[in-house]
Structure formats: C-alpha cells, structure tokens
Image (spheres, coloured by chain):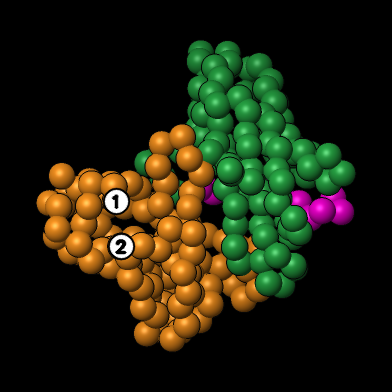
Amino acid sequence: KNQVEQSPQSLIILEGKNCTLQCNYTVSPFSNLRWYKQDTGRGPVSLTIMTFSENTKSNGRYTATLDADTKQSSLHITASQLSDSASYICVVSLGRPGNDYKLSFGAGTTVTVRA
Amino acid sequence: NAGVTQTPKFQVLKTGQSMTLQCAQDMNHEYMSWYRQDPGMGLRLIHYSVGAGITDQGEVPNGYNVSRSTTEDFPLRLLSAAPSQTSVYFCASSPPGGGYGYTFGSGTRLTVV
C-alpha cells in the first residue's frame, strides 16, 4: 500500500480560480514533506518543502500546509493560470534530517486549467 | 550548470535487448538515484548511490544494474529488457544528507516491445 495518498486524481478548473489538492501520508518518521510540480514530459520540480515543525509554506501563488498530527498536507493554488496545468506530486522524505535521502511519492494530482 | 542530464530522451527496445540509460550531474552531489514512473503510481526507487563506489537497491531493483565509478555519473543498465520495464525513468541527485536541493533530470521514456 502506498504510504502517500493524493486526492483528487485529477481536476479541471477555470483560469483565475483557486483550487486545493490533498495529501495524506502514513510514513513515519519523516524528515520533510514536499510538493513538486511536473509538467508533461519533464522531471518534477520542487515547489515547497516543509519540516514536521512547519505548518505552512508559500511559493508565489502556491501555498502548502502541513498537519503533522493528522498526517495531512494540502497545496492551494491561487488565481490559477494556464501554466499551472501539470501534475502535482506530494513527496515525503523518509528518515531523520541529515539522512533523508529516500523519498516516498504520491501518484500525483493532474490539474488542467482552462481559459 | 546543466543540472542533471539524462540520455537518451526516448528509446525503443526489443524484448531481451540490453541497454544503458545515462545520467550525469555537474553539481558535485554525492547522492544519486534512479526512479521509474508508471501511470497511476508514484515514482518508485530502483537503485541509489550515496557516493562514488557505493550503490544500494531501492524498492524495485530486479532487472536493473547500476555502478558509480565517479561522482558525476550514475548509469542504469537493463540486462534483458522486458515489456514490464516500459516506463519513464528519472535520475535525481542531491547534496550530502539528502533533503533539500533534490534535482531531477528530464526523464527517459523507454518502450520495450
């Protein structure tokens, strides 16, 4: 069973609207939780990284939240743009800080932004 | 800096053929790894290396070999290609200690017929 579950699997939104993606994880212990953006035909690119002691992190129009007690994270996209069309992947870094090479990946949420 | 460079970008193999996927990074990262990405699944770790001369198996190592003779290069070898190895392969690297600075290549799309 995957240790990182994302929902929804896909969604379609109109340009300018907001959306929120969900991530539930069972990994323990973990060093940090990341959100990646993966454009079609490209490798994943980091959007945010949060340690277990952080509960929010922003990168422009992207805001990630983390609730380590409930093991849930969300990624909020504000005022979506056509360029936001991509797969968004939740990733949990296993192990302790300083030795957290191994990552556990969610299957991703595919976001399509339409004009 | 070029970051993480993977070659080739696309490859079609016949069942039973062997080949090597190349991965090179110019960031002096100690940690390098190979993942495969299949539809509806998260990236899965094939093999990884924490430094030159050191490699270890990940979650799905069967059918693949790796070596790390230099810090820069981490090739992935398919010994005898099978249709189940049809996938997109990503190489990644990160600085010592892992965590921040994890960088992915742009991927190799492999089809085994």
Chain B's colour is orange
Q: How many marks?
A: 2
First to last magenta residue range? A44-54
**Residue annotated with mark 2:** B63
Left of A48 or right of it: where is B63? left
The chain letter corresponding to green is A
Residue at 67% across, 60% down: A94
**Residue B46 in sight from this viewpoint:** yes
Work out whether residue B80 or residue B9 is closer to the camera in this orientation and state it.
B80
| Amino acid type, residue under disc 2 in the picture | Gly
Q: Which residue is mark 1?
A: B85
Magenta span main SS: strand
- Assign a secondary structure to mark 2: loop
Parent chain of label 1: B
Marks 2,1: beta carbons within 8 A: yes
B62 or B70, which lies in front?
B62
